[in-house]
Amino acid sequence: MAGDEEPFLSEGMDAYLSKPLRKHQSTKLLYNMTVDKPNFPDSPSEEEDQVLLNLEELINRIDGDNDLLNELIIMFRKNASEYLNMIFVAMDNKDFDEITRVTHTLKGMAANMSAISVAKCAYRVEMAAWESRKTEIMDEIAILKIQNRKTVELIENYVKQAAAT
């Protein structure tokens, strides 16, 4: 998050990487810490809330490795579905701590997949759960489920198109 870096660096850390981790950023950091060479250019910033997926960022993050992308899709689809089910069970049990924990995990997973809208929606569920706002949680969970389905479809369509060429 913005502003998290300074306190750590002021306490003596040599560098700081925030989630979601990006291959470009970690490579740049390692390069800058181990070799006295010019810095790599900065990567683009985060997109607007309407964006389902930053496909370009995801492809760059995995260096265009379609086999890895297929594996990530399988894991994302499976894990996101499991997390959504866990959220519904926690909601039935009014276990807001569990909802907060699971949505935090889902948010990080989605961000690492460059699934912008899923990550932001999971964040809104996480914040609503933190404050035990049941109606808002239910509204956002419905949106989260739809956004997740659309994101998976978008990634799968890309993989099919890439395989056809």
Image (tube, grey):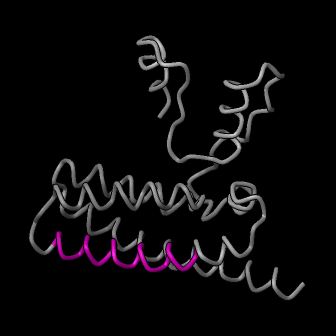
Q: Quadrant of the C terminus?
A: bottom right
Q: Seen in the image, is 124 located left or right of residue 99?
A: right
Q: Position of residue 150 (x, y in %)?
A: 56, 77
Instruction: Residue at 38%, 52% (x, y): give it.
Output: 123
Q: Residue furthest front?
A: 34
| Magenta-tinted stretch | 73-91
Magenta span: predominant SS is helix
In this rendering, the answer to whether 95 lies above or below 151 is above
Magenta-colored stretch includes residue 80: yes
Q: Position of residue 114 (x, y in %)?
A: 60, 58
Q: How many marks?
A: 0
Nearest to the observer: residue 12 or residue 61: 12
Q: Residue furthest right?
A: 165
Q: Seen in the image, is 109 located left or right of residue 70?
A: left
Instruction: Residue at 56%, 46% (x, y): give it.
Output: 21
Q: Position of residue 76 (x, y in %)?
A: 50, 72
Magenta-colored stretch includes residue 57: no
Nearest to the observer: residue 15 or residue 147: 15
Q: Residue furthest left?
A: 93
Q: Seen in the image, is 110 located left or right of residue 102?
A: right
Instruction: Residue at 61%, 50% (x, y): give it.
Output: 48
**Residue 74 sits in which quadrant?**
bottom right
Nearest to the observer: residue 49 or residue 38: 38
In this rendering, the answer to whether 29 lies above or below 55 is above
